[in-house]
Image: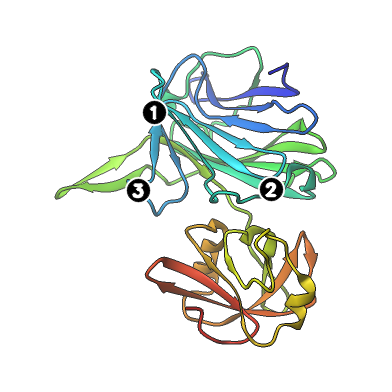
């Protein structure tokens, strides 16, 4: 690998005046941008939780001493979690499912959330400065020794930084992490103090620092319909008249379908859709305004959240009916 296009290590200043490591961002791409976020200091290892969401503790959470999240040019995210300090094996996986894609880096037109991090143990954020360090401006109201959280966004350079004048929040912008993209970090105080879990009849708390995927938020349009980009549903079970075996969308067929099932998307394979649980709930029909590659499709679809033996799913159709 040659010299990276961008490489910065982000530090914050704690209540004792110490600069503490938060994460590192590297653009290691050649012709195309490829971003990597590293959440452990290169000279000192501390345990950190790498998780997909808050519902899977403890079975599907990795507690490691090193972890990377790569955001590739084609929109794929990939965790890299080796066993450190002695490398016995390395786990690579896409948290959105094999073949799933987020917004390609070159297609981010406004902003894209990437990571939500929680800092509880300040002592696990090492104080060894690096040659590429950026130190976040001091804010004793947020970095007070109490827990705080930070969101990492990629934002198109044509948009100004969102104004934020609240005493318990702060927005920091780091320029030129990729072509036309800046890094936006939103800090705020947090009440999160760790995971509660049971060991037999004993309740315990895991208060390691953690990082997890942050999802783009689904929107509701002026008619009350859920806006849904069909691009994020490549892991769905599709009506083959709509999406063929090569995962190509036939928009003409979609518009001409009689009342029928269009797709069945399991939430475990399409994590963006978990937002629908809070937005609409189960067994309630709702209208979907579909998009494709950010272009609105002039058709309304019908959706419903349901469950079967394989898990929770979103059923999409052109009329109310079952999705078995």
Q: Earlier in the sequence, mark 3 or mark 1?
A: 1
Q: Quick one: label 1, few (<14), some, or many (20+) residues within 10 Å?
A: some
Mark identifier at residue 112: 2
Q: Is residue 299 visible?
A: yes
Q: Label 1, label 2: how many angstroms apart (C-alpha)? A: 27 Å
For residue 300, above or below residue 86: below
Spot occupied by residue 116 in the image (x, y as percentages of width and height): 54, 43
Image-quadrant location for residue 292 = bottom right
| Secondary structure state at the residue bearing disc 2 | strand
Disc 1: which residue = 47
Q: Nearer the viewer, residue 84 or 261?
A: 261
For residue 93, above or below residue 228: above
Q: Nearer the viewer, residue 63 or 317?
A: 317
Residue in view at x 80 percent, y 75 percent: 252
Q: Earlier in the sequence, mark 1 or mark 2?
A: 1
Query: Outermost residue, right direction?
Result: 158
Disc 3: which residue = 57
Q: Quick one: label 2, few (<14), some, or many (20+) residues within 10 Å?
A: many
Q: Label 3, label 1: how many angstroms apart (C-alpha)? A: 16 Å
Residue in view at x 60 percent, y 49 percent: 99
Spot occupied by residue 203 in the image (x, y as percentages of width and height): 21, 47
Image-quadrant location for residue 64 = top left
Q: Label 3, label 2: how many angstroms apart (C-alpha)? A: 26 Å
Spot occupied by residue 149 in the image (x, y as percentages of width and height): 52, 41
Horizontal relation, residue 307 to residue 76: left or right: left
Horizontal relation, residue 185 to residue 181: left or right: left
| Secondary structure state at the residue bearing disc 1 | loop
Q: Is residue 166 visible?
A: no
Horizontal relation, residue 212 to residue 25: left or right: left
| Secondary structure state at the residue bearing disc 3 | loop
């Amino acid at each position: 690998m040659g010299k990276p296009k961008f490489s910065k290590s982000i530090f914050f200043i704690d209540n004792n005046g110490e600069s503490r490591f938060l994460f590192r961002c590297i653009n290691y791409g050649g012709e195309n941008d490829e971003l990597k976020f590293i959440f452990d200091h290169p000279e000192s290892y501390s345990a950190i939780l790498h998780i997909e969401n808050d519902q899977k503790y403890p079975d599907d959470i990795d507690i490691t001493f090193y972890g990377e999240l790569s955001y590739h040019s084609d929109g794929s995210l990939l965790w890299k979690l080796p066993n450190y300090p002695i490398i016995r094996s390395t786990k690579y996986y896409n948290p959105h499912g094999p073949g799933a894609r987020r917004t390609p880096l070159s297609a981010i037109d406004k902003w894209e959330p990437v990571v939500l991090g929680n800092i509880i143990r300040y002592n696990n954020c090492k104080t060894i400065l690096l040659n590429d360090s950026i130190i976040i401006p001091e804010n004793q109201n947020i970095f007070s020794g109490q827990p705080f959280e930070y969101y990492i966004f990629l934002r198109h350079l044509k948009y100004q930084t969102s104004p934020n004048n609240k005493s318990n929040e702060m927005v920091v912008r780091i320029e030129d992490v990729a072509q036309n993209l800046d890094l936006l970090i939103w800090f705020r105080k947090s009440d999160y103090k760790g995971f509660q879990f049971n060991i037999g009849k004993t309740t315990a708390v895991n208060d390691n620092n953690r990082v997890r995927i942050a999802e783009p938020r689904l929107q509701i349009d002026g008619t009350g319909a859920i806006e849904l980009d069909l691009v994020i549903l490549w892991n769905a079970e599709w009506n083959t008249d709509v999406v063929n075996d090569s995962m190509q969308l036939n928009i003409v067929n979609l518009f001409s379908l009689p009342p029928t099932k269009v797709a069945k998307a399991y939430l475990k394979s399409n994590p963006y859709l978990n937002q629908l649980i809070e937005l609409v709930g189960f067994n309630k029909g709702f209208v979907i305004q579909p998009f494709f590659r950010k272009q609105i499709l002039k058709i309304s679809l019908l959706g419903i959240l349901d469950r079967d033996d394989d898990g929770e799913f979103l059923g999409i159709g052109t009329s109310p009916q079952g999705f078995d």
